[in-house]
Image (cartoon, rainbow, N blue to C red):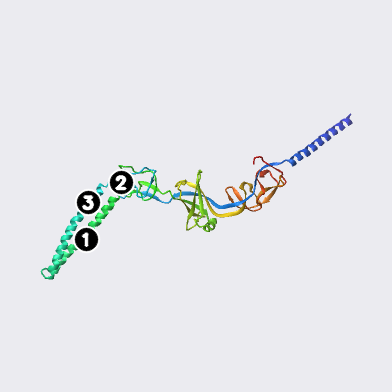
Amino acid sequence: MKAHRHVFVSLSAFCLLLSALFGCSEKKAVQKDERVPVSVAQAVQKDVPVQIRVIGNVQPISTVAVRAQVTGQLMRVSFREGEDVRRGQLLFEIDPRPYQAAMAQAEANLARDEAQLKNAQSEAARYAELVKKDYVTREEYEKYTSGAEAAKAVVAADRAQIENARLQLSYCRIDSPIDGRTGSLQVHAGNLVKANDTTPLVVINQITPVYVQFAVPERDFARVRAVPNAPVVATAQAGGPSETGKLTFLDNAVDPQTGTITMKATFANQTRALWPGEFVNVAMTIANRQAAVVIPAQAVQVSQRGQYVYVVTNGDGVEMRPVVVGTEVDQQAIIDKGVAAGETVVTDGQIRLTPKSKVEVKKGV
């Protein structure tokens, strides 16, 4: 009985061993035939603009802080805050009456002193004839000529006073110095305004055209200098229409703290897509790569040996191929070496791939 029981146990163990071996073989076969689902894209050849992309800030071409140049009561505001104004348009009117009175007084002083000048000149002319005949001394004659010259100087001062009074009176009317858009109104009609007060009456920004200021790393400076008036496209970060302008300003020094150089591009901004103060995405085109091989940027992977892509071969195989990426534009990578136009590269699912993997392209991709 013991011998039969020993044989039965041995046969059972042998059957279990065979089952395990066949099971492993079946599992290995399944793993060997497993295909990795991936997304793919085809490398294409096309002309691609080479651009420098940075963040910029919109600035008005001109900004004017309008201040009163005379003190007085603000009688009239001739615009609504936030509206467009034209150069020469009336903005404010300050009470002119005190300055009109000052001008009238200056004109009266001039009339009086001109009469005195005329009399002094007559006396001097009369004494000039008398001194020739020795009827009066030369000292008396010089006294009258000096009086005439003094009266002449007084008249000149009166005329200057009138010009100053006229200038002060003209300051009672404040016109817009530029075409632009007004900001918040700081002082309303009825208030007393002071000459050259620290708070402006209103600030006017010229927004057609506008500047976009941005900074470029110094490593790109040589390439930018080689393209005078380079085309620049600006787009609001929140989205919306783009504006196209051109590079018009390069700063005269690189900022040693940031290693960048400041630049400005000018935009006509007729649609007013760009607004002073806002941050925008800036794309400056500095070259045009013709017949470049382009693939989606997400196809490029990085390893310790450098950048590489998986290229689909024979329909379902893959090849791990090192590449040289020239630059990236709009999430597209320009391949200088490693991939030819027409080849298919894996764009998603690379993490599960090995050079011996078989792939299955996801449907609808």
Numbered label attached to residue 93: 2
What x and y, as percent, mark residue 116? 17, 58
**Disc 2 residue crowd, few under 14, some 14–19, many 20+, Cα 10 Å:** many
What x and y, as percent, mark residue 292? 61, 53
Label 2, label 3: how far apart the Cα atoms are: 20 Å
Task: Kindly check if marks 2 and 3 are in contact, taking CB atoms under 8 A apart as contact.
Answer: no
User: Which residue sits at x=28%, y=51%?
Assistant: 168
Depth check: give the residue in front, 233 or 66: 233
Q: Amino acid at mark 2?
A: Glu
- For label 2, the SS is strand
**Disc 1 residue crowd, few under 14, some 14–19, many 20+, Cα 10 Å:** some
Depth check: give the residue in front, 26 or 36: 36
For the C terminus, the image quarter is top right
Total residue callouts: 3
In screen coordinates, is 179 left or right of 306?
Answer: left
Label 1, label 2: how far apart the Cα atoms are: 35 Å
- For label 3, the SS is helix
Q: Amino acid at mark 3?
A: Ala
Q: Amino acid at mark 1?
A: Ala
Instruction: List the residue tagged with mark 1.
Output: 153
Instruction: List the residue tagged with mark 3.
Output: 104
In the image, residue 123 sits, relative to residue 335, either above or below, namely below
- For label 1, the SS is helix
Residue 162: image quadrant is bottom left
Numbered label attached to residue 230: none
